[in-house]
Image (tube, coloured by chain):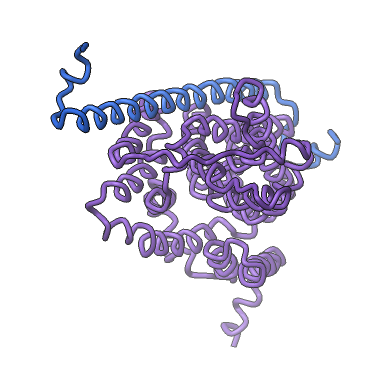
């Protein structure tokens, strides 16, 4: 297998530096994508909740104001 | 009379082989209906660019100029195509069940694992990363990443990316069946169409753009264009622009993109043994993307009450909307009353966003 790969003129198999860089891309990339996804899920859920809260309040009171929504009854 | 055979004399065997490859792409596009909008212009372009003394690729030739302006200078064409794609996507099914986003992220696993394999085989990191992005199953992202990273194999990567996208209905069912049990494939998922408000739909593209921009700024060109297209669709006051972006605009860009990409399909750059390795690695990326999505669904089932059918995990590879259709078809094959389409669409569109983000992340991590 190794001999076959060496037949490809532009390839240098098992280059330690390139391997290290690719492993860095793996963990840093996966970490970043799941952080982004996590934040998007949280942001979407919060937005949906707030909009639902606002709609409920509007339906009940006909008037919408941020202060009133969060005011304790 | 020498001028009459000047072209014939200049013909190289490599160019003749490229005509055959061009012919094959045209055949696949017309006869097999494999991504015809891209493969047909690319096939014709491969012939056009490999005619001896072809002026279209010479100094100030039309295809060379299109390539330099539309792709090389700013990656404008693939990015503009993302506006059209964004305008086509309805994120409603994803917004109804945002946790499906996790599957879209997991289905990018094949990209990373392929980068490692390509690095082990001996590709320089720029080329390895560009080859891995074939697993994004997203043509514009593959073009953008391989161009920005100045890969030596751009043409092969793009041809392989589009070819495998067309092979999703063949590759994915086999992999999903290998990774799941019959019982898992029979899991029924209730689709409760939670009313997604217009305000949520409008805020979503803005939220995604801001978060992606803050955590992975390099992904902003791709994600920004995608979300801009979606905002045009969802805002409700730009119907005419939205329709244009979805149809005429996308068609024009696709048409130009295909023929422009063929500039990279010149015999000396394309006909290399490495192209065969890239084809194998592309398949590897698709397979491991599918495995990533399926196993993530199985993992999530360990902690959730409402079980997820792992078939929909496979739809997390971008390939929109084909991957979602494949998941629906597989679900129906197992149980005719088991409709997974809406869930699969949710996962599929999340894969579209995730692949664009991963494309940007990889550019940032390599450069």
In this rendering, the answer to whether B92 lies above or below A54 is below
Quick check: A56 above or below B333? above
Quarter of image, res B243: bottom left
Left or right of A62: which side holds A35? right
Chain A visual colour: blue
Q: Is residue A15 left or right of residue B224?
A: right
Name of the residue lying farthest toward the top: A72
Q: Residue B290: where, in percent of width, then height?
A: 67, 39
From the viewer's side, name the closer residue of B315 and B76. B315
* Residue shown at 55% from the left, 32% from the top: B105
Given residues B358 and B120, the one toward you in this image is B358
**Chain B is which colour?**
purple
Is residue B23 positioned above or below B215 on the image? below
Q: Is residue B291 visible?
A: yes
Looking at this view, is B323 or B137 the one in front? B323
Q: Position of residue B351 (x, y in %)?
A: 53, 39
Which of these two is toward me, B110 or B189? B189
Q: Is residue B150 visible?
A: no
Figure quadrant of residue A16:
top right
- Give the quarter of the figure containing the N terminus of chain B: bottom right
Q: Name the residue located 22 percent from the left edge and 33 percent from the top edge.
A: A59
Q: Residue at x 38, y 63 (%)?
A: B247
In the rendered image, residue B364, in percent from the top left (x then y), is placed at 47, 28
Find residue B42 and report its horizontal and vertical position in percent: 56, 63
Question: Residue furthest toward the front?
Answer: A60
């Amino acid at each position: 297998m190794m001999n076959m790969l060496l037949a490809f003129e532009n390839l240098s198999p098992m280059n330690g530096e390139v391997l290290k860089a690719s492993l860095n891309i793996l963990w840093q990339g996966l970490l970043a994508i799941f952080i982004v996804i996590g934040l998007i899920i949280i942001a979407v859920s919060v937005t949906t909740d707030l909009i639902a809260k606002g709609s409920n309040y509007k339906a009940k009171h006909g008037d919408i104001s941020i202060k009133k929504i969060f005011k304790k009854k | 009379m020498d001028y009459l055979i000047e072209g014939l004399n200049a013909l190289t065997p490599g160019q003749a082989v490229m005509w055959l490859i061009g012919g094959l792409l045209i055949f696949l596009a017309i006869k097999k209906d494999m991504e015809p909008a891209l493969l047909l212009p690319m096939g014709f372009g491969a012939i056009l660019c490999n005619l001896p003394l072809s002026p279209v690729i010479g100094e100030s030739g039309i295809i060379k100029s299109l390539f330099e302006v539309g792709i090389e200078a700013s990656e404008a064409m693939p990015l503009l195509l993302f506006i059209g794609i964004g305008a086509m996507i309805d994120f409603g099914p994803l917004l109804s069940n945002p946790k499906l986003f996790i599957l879209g992220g997991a289905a990018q696993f094949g990209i990373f694992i392929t980068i490692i394999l390509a690095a082990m085989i001996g590709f320089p990191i720029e080329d390895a990363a560009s080859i891995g992005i074939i697993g994004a199953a997203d043509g514009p992202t593959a073009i953008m990443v391989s161009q920005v990273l100045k890969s030596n194999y751009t043409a092969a990567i793009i041809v392989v990316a589009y070819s495998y996208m067309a092979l999703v209905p063949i590759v994915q069912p086999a992999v999903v069946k290998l990774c799941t049990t019959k019982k898992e494939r029979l899991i029924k998922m209730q689709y409760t169409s939670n009313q997604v408000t217009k305000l949520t739909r409008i805020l979503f593209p803005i939220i995604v753009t801001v978060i992606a921009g803050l955590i992975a700024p390099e992904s902003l060109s791709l994600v920004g264009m995608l979300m801009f297209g979606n905002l045009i669709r969802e805002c409700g006051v730009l119907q005419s622009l939205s329709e244009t972006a979805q149809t005429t605009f996308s068609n024009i860009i696709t048409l130009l993109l295909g023929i422009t990409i063929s500039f990279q399909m010149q015999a000396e750059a394309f006909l290399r043994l490495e192209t065969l390795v890239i084809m194998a690695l592309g398949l590897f990326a698709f397979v491991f993307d599918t495995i990533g999505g399926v196993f993530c669904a199985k993992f999530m089932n360990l902690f959730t009450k409402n079980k997820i059918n792992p078939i929909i995990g496979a739809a997390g590879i971008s390939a929109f909307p084909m991957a979602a259709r494949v998941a629906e078809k597989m679900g129906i094959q197992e149980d005719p009353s088991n409709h997974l389409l809406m869930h699969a669409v949710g996962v599929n569109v999340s894969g579209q966003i995730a692949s664009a983000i991963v494309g940007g992340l990889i550019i940032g991590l390599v450069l």
